[in-house]
Amino acid sequence: MNAVSLTAALKEEAVRLGFELVGAAPVVMSPDFDRFEPLWGRERIAKLKKDAIQTPLIDISSTEVRKRLAAGEDVRGMLHPDVIDYIQRHGLYR
């Protein structure tokens, strides 16, 4: 199932900064973007529809990732190599 979720706070910040954000949540189906037209305008909604990318949900627990990182365990199958490099360079989750 593909899904899109925008929390109220995230939506406000995204609009304020001019970003178009699409994220996944397993319980929310892709929204009817047209209902946001009064808030964001026709042009922004058209861009959202054009730029929205449907992606499969990936069952990876962020808690498990942090736990493994803190224990020095391998997370290569859970995170992109660039993310792992960033975490290691900045000494995160030790």
Image (cartoon, helix red, strand yellow):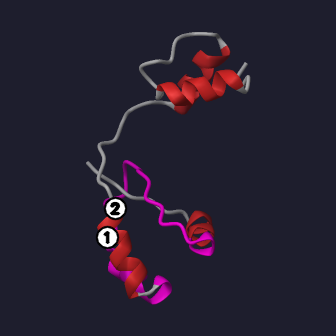
**Quadrant in the picture for residue 71:** top right
Give the residue drawn at x 38%, y 58%.
4
Q: Which residues are magenta?
A: 15-40
Q: Under tag 1, what secondary structure?
A: helix
Taking depth in this image into account, of 75 and 66 the one nearest to the observer is: 75
Q: Residues within 10 Å of mark 1 (few under 14, many from 20)?
A: few
On the image, the x and y values in percent for residue 17 come to 62, 70
Taking depth in this image into account, of 3 and 80 the one nearest to the observer is: 80
Give the residue drawn at x 39%, y 84%.
43
Query: Residue lying furthest left in this view?
Result: 1
Q: Under tag 2, what secondary structure?
A: loop
Amino acid type of disc 2?
Ala
Amino acid type of disc 1?
Lys
Give the residue drawn at x 54%, y 63%.
7
Q: Residues within 10 Å of mark 2 (few under 14, many from 20)?
A: some
Q: Is residue 2 above or below residue 70?
A: below
Query: Residue lying furthest bottom in this view?
Result: 38
Residues at discs 2 and 1 in contact (Cβ within 8 Å): yes
Label drawn at residue 79:
none
Give the residue drawn at x 26%, y 48%.
1
Please state if 12 lies on the left or on the right of 90 as rendered.
Answer: left
Label drawn at residue 49:
1
On the image, the x and y values in percent for residue 52 come to 34, 61
Instruction: Please identify the quadrant where the C terminus is shown.
Output: top right
Magenta residue check for 44: no
Q: Is residue 80 above or below residue 26?
A: above
On the image, the x and y values in percent for residue 44 come to 42, 79
For disc 2, the marked residue is: 52
How far apart are labels 2 and 1 at the CA level? Answer: 5 Å
On the image, the x and y values in percent for residue 93 come to 70, 24
**Quadrant in the picture for residue 32:** bottom left
